[in-house]
Image (tube, grey):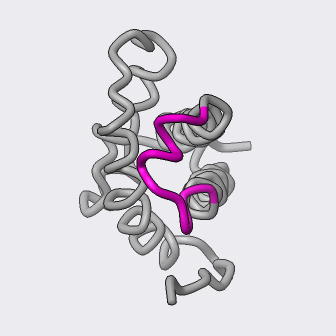
Amino acid sequence: MRPDERDPAHLWDMLEAAMAIARYGRGKTIDEYLRDPMFRDAVERQFILVGEAARRLTEEFRAAHPEIPWQGVIGQRNVLIHRYEEIDDRLMWERIQRDVPDLIRLLSPLIPNPPVVESES
């Protein structure tokens, strides 16, 4: 299989992980996030998956879609894996609230037959 044939699968992986993060954070507060290590672990795991899938996309694909902050997405994965002592839980909460919805919005049109994303009503 040529590497570019795998790009759609990596995009799906990114979208599914981002949607999981959004589900985990829906209706929660920062205090709940800070008090619950299992919640933080689940979110961090999904952020790692988002970043790993982004890292596996071809350079050509990433270059063709500069609207997505690839460096930041992959950099977050690197911090979570290699520099875990630098994890800032308040910054992670901010990413759940601000960055993840934007990422879902940007990824969805790039995927053939994307799933319907639940609106935040």
Let me know if residue 77 appears in the view. yes
Tally of numbered discs:
0
In the image, 69 versus 23, the foreground residue is 23
* Residue drawn at x 26%, y 63% as measured from the top left: 67
Q: Is residue 13 left or right of residue 52?
A: right
Which residue is rendered at x = 57% and y = 54% of the image?
A: 21
Instruction: Please name whichever residue, 39 or 66, is drawn nearer the observer in this view of the structure.
Output: 39
**Which percent across, then down, holds residue 20?**
65, 57
Q: Could you tell whether 8 is left or right of 51 in the image?
A: right
Q: Looking at the rendering, which quadrant does residue 112 occupy?
A: bottom right
Q: Is residue 7 visible?
A: no
Where does the N terminus fall, quadrant-wise? Answer: top right
Q: Is residue 77 above or below residue 11?
A: above
Residue 35 at x, y = what percent? Answer: 53, 35
Quarter of the rendering containing residue 56? top right
Q: Residue furthest right?
A: 1
67 in magenta: no
Whether 86 is drawn above or below 57: the answer is above
- Which residue is at 33% across, 15% downward? 86
Span of residues in magenta: 24-36
Look at the picture and state if 9 lies above or below 111: above
Q: Position of residue 85 (x, y in %)?
A: 39, 9
Q: Residue 72 appears at what percent x and percent y?
A: 29, 39
